[in-house]
Amino acid sequence: MARNVFETLTVLVVDDSSHMRYLLLGLLRALGVGEVILANDGDEAWSKYILHKPDLVITDAAMAPGDGFALAKRLRNDDIATSRHVPIIMISAHTEISAIERAREVGITEFVRKPLVPRALYERLIAVVNRKYEINPAALRKVADDQPQVAFL
């Protein structure tokens, strides 16, 4: 039986707007995401990240206290190995080049503009999942060299 690619994911959703949190919760559930954790701001998100170790973080850019940029920077600079590599999707109405460049500088993986279009969220989720399971050809060659019974077609 085919499995939903998202059903094993745990996603942390961070937004100071309860409307956006529950909109994202509904969209993620409709896409079959296994577990969704909600946080009001970057500070609460940090606590929930430490507790749950989600596979993905979706965050708003502008929040107080602790906006999405500060959260991303904290995740990328922390000593917790998992936080340095967790994919982060930022959702923001601020789509000027400076905001996108700032997002890239702090380690945002994907950027989605508001108003949110479900298709855009789906595409960013697919991009993140594909990146997570991307096959490294050099690693395949090493496995093939170590285990000659493996055949690549």
Image (cartoon, grey):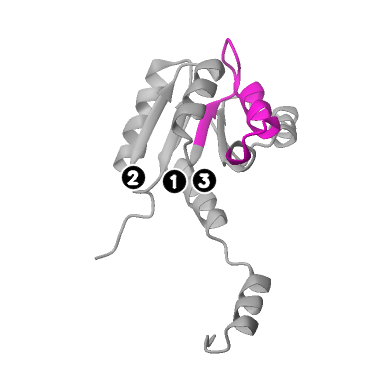
Count neighbours of disc 1 (C-alpha within 10 A) and say few if under 14, some if 14 to 19, many if 20 or more.
Answer: some
Instruction: Name the residue tied to disc 1.
Output: 122
Instruction: Name the residue tied to disc 3.
Output: 124
Q: Amino acid at mark 3?
A: Arg
Q: Residue at x 62, y 35 (%)?
A: 80
- Callout count: 3
Q: Quadrant of residue 60?
A: top right
In the displayed structure, 97 sits above or below 41; it is below
Q: Amino acid at mark 1?
A: Tyr
In the displayed structure, 136 sits above or below 38; it is below
Which range of residues does the magenta coloring cover?
Answer: 57-82
Q: Residue at x 44, y 16 (%)?
A: 17
Query: Quick one: 76 or 79, which is closer to the camera?
Result: 79
Q: Earlier in the sequence, mark 1 or mark 2?
A: 2
Q: Amino acid at mark 2?
A: Leu
Instruction: Name the residue tied to disc 2.
Output: 31
Q: Are marks 1 and 2 in contact (CB under 8 Å)?
A: yes
Q: Earlier in the sequence, mark 3 or mark 2?
A: 2
CA distance for labels 1 and 2:
8 Å
Q: Magenta includes 77?
A: yes
Q: Residue at x 38, y 55 (%)?
A: 5
- x, y percentage for residue 89? 55, 37
In the displayed structure, 1 sits above or below 56; it is below
